[in-house]
Amino acid sequence: MFSTSQFPPHNDAQHEESFICQSSISDDCDNDGTCTGYLDTVLTVFQRYNHPFVLVGTAATRRNGCRGYVRELDVLVRSSQIGAIVDDLVSSKQWAKCDEKPAYAGDEHRGNETAVKDIWLEARFADTPATYLGFAHLRFWPEELYQLSVIDCQKIEVPDAMALNSVQLEEDYHRDQSRRFGPNLTDSVHAFGLSLTPGPKHRARSVSCQDIPIFIPTVQSHLNSLLDQYRAQAATGLSIGSGTGGLVKDYIRYNLFDWPPARDWLLESGRIEARNMELMEERIRKYRRKPALSWDKEAGKYVFVNDFFKAVLGPLAGANTVNGE
């Protein structure tokens, strides 16, 4: 399941080589800004520098069992190469460096207050910002800031940058064997006739770039990096602007890590590093799930309408909660 392909060390001489795949953005954009291969230029630049293309943030968690709206594509980048990669993308005229983070990002969190800076890029396809599936920005995260190594982290290769429906690719994280509740698995998504990847016209890569892989970190690598971020921000009092707490909460919520069997398995499986164990236990302990309740007129009380709460939390919640008293 895991892909841990090791890219060779960067060779400056390779910077002069031509692109292996040619971007088709300028030719294949529709009037609405939707493009085939909207990441072609980005992927070829990363390939030129022998740099794996690793998505983090919500674009990754949507394939790690979590739901969430992708407002930008978060990309993990080596600090030693981030400047050269950004320069090449700006030179392509298809991406422009943002002097400030997008206005919408200021509403969600404090932003990056550290000395190690992330970089925002805005799409400039067809002379206007692209609005593919609602996002038009890339956010490059230096390894030191995201607390994750491009090479050393465990990775999973994914078919596209965007998952249309949330899914848990690592099935061992789905702890309810009867599948009464829990994150979607690939076969259940397909069983409902849903798709995980966009149609051909709306994919990140054109046909000529299909051989350039797109990765996400495994749950273990990503979750530990988020916990490392959490501890670093607590120690320094400085935000990195990643919405760390919300992403950790999403892992707990959608993978049901507050359910004792799933919680115990996670904490005993070795997937949480020793340095993060106390913090993970605390985050699970403090997490409060909102029950899905409906007023039953005939019974004169609130009843659980969600299978998870009926099967698991109902007996634990107590009569007072169920009766609404």
Image (tube, rainbow, N blue to C red):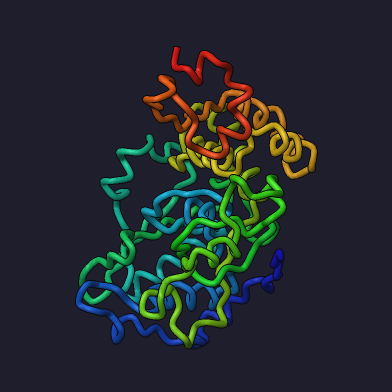
| 287 or 256, nearer to the observer | 256
Question: Can residue 91 be spotted in the picture?
Answer: yes
Q: Which residue is drawn at 64% across and 64% down?
A: 156
Quadrant of residue 107 in the image?
A: top left
Rendering coords of residue 16 (x, y %):
51, 84
Q: Is residue 136 above or below residue 176?
A: below
Q: Residue at x 60, y 65 (%)?
A: 187
Task: Looking at this view, name the residue that lies furthest to the front.
Answer: 298
Rendering coords of residue 96 (x, y %):
31, 65
Rendering coords of residue 252 (x, y %):
58, 38
Taking the image as shown, residue 172 lies to the left or right of residue 22, namely right
Taking the image as shown, residue 80 lies to the left or right of residue 294, namely right
Q: Which residue is drawn at 70% across and 70% down?
A: 5
Q: Is residue 129 above or below residue 153?
A: below
Count of labels in the image? 0
Q: Which residue is drawn at 60% across and 31% down?
A: 231
Taking the image as shown, residue 311 lies to the left or right of residue 139, namely right
Quadrant of residue 203 in the image?
A: bottom left
> In the picture, which quadrant includes the C terminus?
top left
| 14 or 244, nearer to the observer | 244
| 308 or 276, nearer to the observer | 308
> In the picture, which quadrant includes the N terminus?
bottom right
Rendering coords of residue 245 (x, y %):
51, 35
Question: Can residue 84 be spotted in the picture?
Answer: no
